Every structure is written in structure tokens, then in C-alpha cells.
Image: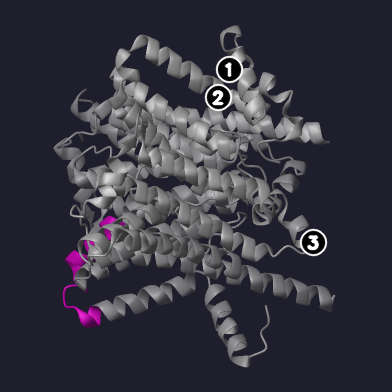
Amino acid sequence: MTDSAPPASGLEEASQPEADPPGTSAAGRLARLLVGSELVGIFSPVVLLGLAMAAAFPGFASPFNIDALLATIAVTSVVGLAQVSVLAIGHFNLALPAIGAFTGMVLGWLLQVAGLDWVAAVALALVLAAVLGLLQGMVIALLRLNAFIVTLGLASAYYGLMYVALGNERYQRIGTTLPVIGRGAAGPIPNIFILSMLTCAVVWVAVQFTVPGRRLLAVGASPLAARFSALPVQRIVVAAHAASGLLAGIAAVLVVSRLAVGSPAIGQDWLLTSFAAPVLGGTILSGGKVSVVGTVLGAALLAMIANALVIVGVSQYWYQAGLGLIILGAASLDRLRLRLLTAGRL
Amino acid sequence: MTLAAPAAKRLLGALRRIATAGPSGVIVGMLLLALALSLSTHTFATAENFKVIALGAAVTVVVGLAQMVVVGAGGLNLSVGATGGLVAVVCGSLMNSFAMPPVAAVAAGLAVGTLAGGLTGAVIVRGAFSPFIVTLAAGSILTGIALGITQSVPYYNLPDDFQALGTATVLGVPVIFLVALGLAGLLGFVFRYASFGRQILAFGANPRAAELGGVPLARLQVAIYALSGFLSAWASVLLIARLGDGDPAVGRDWLLVSFAAPIIGGTRLAGGYVSVVGTVLGALLLAILVNGLVHWNANVFFVQLISGGIILAAGGIERVREISSEASERRERRGA
């Protein structure tokens, strides 16, 4: 069950009755044709909020603001997908912020202290991120420990290791090439947004069309059934966590290239949005059903809300409270979707 | 899992003995650690330092209990720290901005914490949501409110008589540590003798069976999260009495220890079994460890690394416990 899931026709009316007012029904229909009807629930508010903000505040559609907005969406999308790859098997990854910080710091160190070429540094940093994810996957799969407690413990261990090895450093002399790429843009579209969307496209293809992707969802839908079908469940669990680590690493590289600094603060605000974006977009928390396109749209909605609050002048602290409410709302949708899905299938 | 090699078998046997030793295992670990510290430093085994350890452990004990009551019911509460932060702000503002007497401010703080927990429980019950996502969201909401009210600026210098309580001692033992022990004693009584405590454990062991046994699940779950909020609020009150400031950052680093203390002490992560004594001892062990690393002049960040390792080890020990209880069940079945 993914983006193109069939029993979704009755879903969007039930889950988002007000999401299809006459004014946007054309856009809604278009979206339905493009990515399957289920995504209208998240697509409509993104469009509505965008139009409303653009109409009310001229600053919203300014090139500067669009650039900032797309950069945020770029990072949040990849962070969301990092969570999605373990949500697919019904796990949580609480170590995403730690992996992000660790990768960002090591990238900074490789560039500033070790003096590595940027390509080699980025490649090594991504390998590290994948290894950190792989490690937690192996602890979970081989020792059969609870995924929650393992990622909680390893998050602390990763932070500790990072600080012990590199200290509370800010690597700001990371050369020119990476920041030029990260701050550059193709017309109105920042480079990191393009890189992020390429990453998302790869994930989408992997989930939708490849055997490992389908196996991931099979394990999430029912680990027992997957085992009885002779799927290598443990290897799939390890792979899901490794992919999660790698995606967190990619997000960290995007942040470092954009801000031109490697610091321990990278990733500190990732945890909530990593759950909010996928759940807003229709990924089910208990595993077996993910939506890559929905996650990107969820990230877009979160970024636009944060951006709108800044423009309106609401303190970022209240945004945090609002984010909690958004997650609760998304969880309600999640419930409803699950109920309708089961009802439709039985 | 093949255990062909006798060495592996012996290792597993040793692990199983450690894992099933219960609180006595924690006591042995604690004594060994204290012994090593006493021998290697001359600043550890002093009355003054024991007071410092007790001051730190007081908060950790209550934080661990706040998580333990939820874990015992098979749930988890990611908003323990956020509740602590909001309660710190509520108490701070009532004492400093509204000049309320500390007793009234503390009572209000405890009420807010209990209410926040109860609301969280109600949302979980009403939506049949996973506690993970609801308490994650609740944590964000409570932290947002605490930071929004204060704009991240603490209420500095709480009233002197309140601050005095934070460092006061009775016969050399800090008052806040005695309060923590009192709360632990109360919980121990609840879990041993009160039907509420038994119902929590029945629910944690098997929700379906508990429901069929006539446990009012909805009301019970609201009560469990309210109790967790109440205990989180107490932890916050003890901490701000010691710090002297109503700081919204209170609770930011509670998540890890809130799980570590009960799991080290033998509380089952899957629910159905708690150990109040174990949680108190687990918190003491953590407090001694943090204190010991300071005396060993270790990098402060080692604490983070080791805490992570400890919680993994605790998770591993729980897993060994599970394996050995499964094995003994199998043996019993074969014998019968």
C-alpha cells in the first residue's frame, strides 16, 4: 500500500471534508490525477496557505523568502524520509538528530582540519551516517532489542562520542566549493532544493518499484507474515535503519553546505518534524504504508506554517506549541485513514 | 541462536544470573562503583559529597518514578521533561510575579502537572492513539507554552524560604531527597496494596485480560498519565528549589534518565512489572556515576556517552531476562 493505493477514493472526503472547496477543486483534481487521490488532503492546505499568504503579504512571494522557504522544505523533506524508512517497518528512530549532528561535525572536521577535498569529505561523511544507522539496525535486529530504547540510548551515545572526539566546536573554514553549491540557486530555486528533490525521487522509485522497497513495506505490514514468506526480516530491519542514517546524513550535508558551518546544533530541531511531515502526508505510524510524495508535501506545509508565523510576527516558541497540535491533528488523520483502510479492505 | 560453544553457554548463564538478580544486582554494582571511587580519589567519600549525590539523586528518583508508572502500564511518556519545564515556569511566575506563598505556588504547579498528564491520557484514550506520538506532541505543546510565556528567560531568584528548602538537611540528609523517598514509599504502597496499582500492572501485562477482568481501562489510563504528570511536577519542584530559579529549560535532559533508572532497576519495558526500590537504586547508581566522573576529572561529555551505553545495557539485560523466563516456561511446560 503506497501512494497509488486503490481504496482511497472515499478517503479524502471523510478525512478532509473541507479540503475541497469549490475554489481549489480544479487543483485538487489535478493533484488526484498526478499522485493519487489520497494526497489531496495535504496538497490542498499547502496550496491554500500559499495563496492566502501571497495575497496578504507581498513579502511572502519575494525571491528572498521563496529561497528561504524552499531551503527549509529541502532539509525537512529529507529528514522526514529518514524517519519514513524506519516507520515503514513500524520502528521509530530517535537518533536522527544525533546522526545529523555527528555527520555535520565530521564533515566540518574533514574539510577544515583534515583538509580533504569536498567530494571525498562528503562521501566519507555519508558513509559515517550510514554506518551509524547500520549499527543501530544491527543492535535491534541481532540482539532483538526494543527499537525505541536502542535509538534513545544510541542517540545519547552518538552525541557523547561526537563531543568527546571533536569537542563543542564550530567548523567555519570549510572551503569555498561546498558553500557555493549550498548557497547557489538555479533561477529562483536553491540548489539544495534540487538536490533534496533528487534524493526524494530516488527514495520514491526505491519504495515504489524495487524489490527491497516492497520488502520493507511487507515487513512493516506484518513481520510474522514476512517471516513466513521467507523474507530475510533481520536483514531488512538493518537495511531500513542504515537507509535512515544515510538520509539523515544527506540532510546534514545539505545544512552544512547551506550554512557553511559544521556545528553540534545541526539536527537539534529535527525530531518533531521528522514525525510530523510523514504523518501529515499519510504515512502510517504502525508500519506497512508510506507516502514519499506526502512526506514532501507535509514538509512543505510545516515549512510554510513556520514561515507564515515569522512573517506575521509570532514568536518561534509558540510555533513549537503549534507543532505539537499539528502532530496531534495528523495523528487523528492517521487513525481515521487506518480505520477506513481496514474497513475498505475487509 | 545456537549455543554450541560451552563458553557462550557459560557467558549467557552469567548474564542471566546478573539479569535476574533484581535490585541486589544494582546494589552490588553501586557498591563496586563507590568502592572504586573511594579508593581512587580522596574527594569522593566525604559527607559533603554524599550530600551532593543525594541532592542530584532526589530529582532523578522522581523523574524515574514518573516514567516507571507509565512503563508499568505498557506505555511511555516522552513529555516528562516538558511537564517539568512548564511546572518550573508556573511555580516561578506565581512566586516571583504574583508574590504567592511558596506552598500555594507549589500546589498550583503540582495541579498543572497533574492536569497536563490527565489531558494527555484522555487524548490517548479518546483517539486510541499510540502513547508515543501523543506524548511527543504533548511535550512540544508544553515546552512551547513554557517558552512562549517566559520568552525563554528564567524566573531568577525564587523566594529565600523556598530556596532554603532545596538545600536544607535533616540529620545530614537533604530534605528534597527525603521527599523523593517519601514519594517512592507512597508509590510502593500503591503498587503493593492499592487496587489502582494492581490494575496498572494488570493492564501493562495484558490489556485485554485486564478489560475482561473488569478494569475500567479508559479511567485507568487517564489516571496513570495524571500520576506521571504529578510526579514530573514534583521532580520539577525539587529541582527548582535546589537551583533557585524557575527555568523553562528544566527537564530538557530528563528523557534518557527517566528510562534508564527504572530499566536498570528491573522494571519491564513491555509493562506488567515495576520495581519502586529498583528505580530508586537505579537513580542512585546514575547519580553516583555522574558524580564519580566529575571526581575522575572525566570529560563531561563522557556522561552522555556512558548514559547511552547504560540504557543499551539495561535494554540488553531486560532481553536476557525475557529469554531466560521464556526458557524456564518451556522447561516447566515440558516437565508438566
In the picture of the structure, the residue carrying the numbered disc 2 is A43
**Mark closest to the chain's N terminus, 3 or 2:** 2
Q: Which amino acid, mark 3?
A: Phe
Q: Is residue A317 above or below residue B51?
A: above
Tell me where residue B247 appears, x and y as whole percent.
24, 39
Q: Chain of mark 3?
A: A
Name the residue that disc number 1 marks.
A27
Task: Provide the residue span drawn in magenta.
Answer: B38-56
| Depth order, front residue of B240/B187 | B240
Q: Nearer the viewer, residue B328 or A130?
A: A130
Residue on which disc 3 sits: A228
| Helix, strand or loop at mark 1 | helix
Where on the picture, by quarter, is residue A15?
Answer: top right
The chain under label 1 reads A
* Label 2 to label 1: alpha-carbon separation: 9 Å
Give the residue at x 67% y 70%.
Answer: B325
**Is residue B302 shown in magenta?**
no
Tell me which corner region of the image, top left, top right, bottom left or bottom right, holds residue A33: top right
Query: Do residues under tags 2 and 1 come within 8 Å of each other at their CB atoms?
Result: yes
Instruction: State which quadrant residue B46 falls in.
Output: bottom left
In the depicted view, which residue is nearer to us: B5 or A88? A88
Give the residue type at disc 2. Answer: Phe
